Image (cartoon, rainbow, N blue to C red):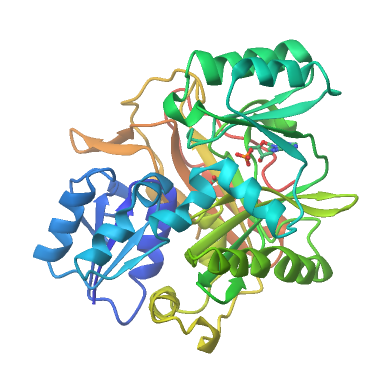
Amino acid sequence: MKVLVIGGGGREHTLVWKIAQSPKVSEVYCAPGNPGMKNLAKIVNISVDDINVLADFAEKNKIDLTVVGPEAPLVSGIVDEFEKRGLKIFGPSKAAAQIEGSKVFSKNLMKKYNIPTAKYQVFEKPQDAIDYIHSVNMPQVIKAEGLAAGKGVVIAQDRDTAEAAVKSIMIDKTFGNSGNRIVIEEYLQGPEVTVLAFCDGKVAVPMVSSRDHKRVCDGDKGPNTGGMGAVSPAPAYSVELDQVVKESIIQKTVDAMAKEGMPFKGVLYTGLMLTQEGPKVLEYNCRFGDPEAQVVIPRLKTDLVDIMLAILNGNLADVQIEWRQEAAVCVVMASGGYPGHYETGKVITGLEDAEKTGAIVFHAGTTVKNNKIVTAGGRVLGITALGKDVQTARQKAYEAVSKIHFDGMHYRKDISK
Ligand code: AMP
Ligand code: GLY
């Protein structure tokens, strides 16, 4: 089989790494890919937003299966376009991707089907939102309705911050049309857990749990990022909780989507807060998490391509999905200044030495310049290690990290703690 992976970050490097191991697969392509995957895949210079050009490429090169990493093309309807042309593609339809593309859609879905989540209100007019803020207790959480590259959520401890968030999203349009409507919701407390699930439109099979570390600095300080590292399994997640989440949240969500006439096929990402009242949904995404994929996929024993094909055939229940008992830790190495302004083009050294430790070096923001691998983004590398427990995996990941250098680099020292 020929497989095309769409995306170019650490999540997509992980997908390519796993898919290339499948005995069914003869060739892997990745668009736009990154230099870390050059021994595993052919790099295709097409952007993830060029849906028609990607579909033309798949047709011309007789791609047997396309796998979509990021949310933007899913929300724009890449799956519908490929299916219209009779091409096999793994991911939810445009209608089903609304579960991530519109927080108003997902909150209303949860309310209608009694799926536990924070209490909320939707606003279309900034003044109504501001009046509401003055009528409720703080903190409150302000969310832009649409996609905002992980930056559309503000946790407002006081009314001034909340008002500023409403103005920035709805009046200044910091996230464009994604801020036409906002959700204001109750502030929840507790440990966070990510549960990804394979879904074939009817059946949901949760993967092993994971947790990402969104804040830039140790001790969960500083601004939010795309994710500074991840661990699997998530601490604080028990077998009992897993059962509750599977039945009262994940399967219920897949049933709800089917009842709404938009069956969810692909990977459903559920971000949970484990509150004292039980687990509640913070957000859904319509794809693998990044960097959660970098710790979950290396723990998967089963052939990922077999699972994806079963999902496309609607017979996921027939596949036996097996996981390694070992834990996994991924440490993200970022450019100086990230998540704010950062420079690129810094030479990266020590990549081979890092791999010699047994860790896996997943590339994200890297490129090749003058035959050298240099930085090209905020999150540059994700270093993943497996170990018999979280502590062993963490030690191995940080040992590999210590071999790598680029000017200005920074990373958290407390991933998985
Ligand atoms: P989201 O993109 O909706 O997952 O939000 C990003 C992050 O904001 C989450 O991972 C949480 O850390 C935090 N967050 C979102 N919603 C809430 C909430 N209702 N209460 C507390 N924290 C939240
Ligand atoms: N790690 C968060 C996300 O993928 O959205």
In the drawing, does residue 226 fall left or right of residue 95? right
- Residue 23 appears in the picture as rendered: yes
In the image, taking residue 333 as reference, residue 122 lies left or right, namely right
Residue located 77% across and 41% down the image? 119
Task: Give the residue drawn at x 66%, y 74%.
Answer: 325
Q: Residue furthest bottom?
A: 318
How many numbered discs sit on the rendered protein?
Answer: 0
* Residue drawn at point x = 75 percent, y = 49 percent: 117
In the displayed structure, 298 sits above or below 136; it is below
In the image, taking residue 59 as reference, residue 186 lies left or right, namely right
Query: Image quadrant of ligand 1?
Result: top right
Is 192 left, or right, of 404 in this rendering? right
Q: Answer with the quarter of the image where residue 163 lies.
A: top right
Report the front residue among 124 and 267. 124
Could one spot residue 283 in this view of the protein?
Answer: no
Q: Is residue 21 above or below residue 289?
A: below
Residue 217: horizontal and vertical position, in percent? 66, 28
Is 204 drawn above or below residue 407 in the view shown? below
Q: Residue furthest right?
A: 276
Q: Quadrant of the N terminus?
A: bottom left
x, y percent for residue 227 = 57, 40
Residue at 43% over, 48% down: 71
* Percent of width and height locating residue 138: 83, 23
Instruction: Judge whether 27 appears above or below 46 on screen.
Output: below
Query: Residue 293: x percent and y percent?
Result: 51, 56
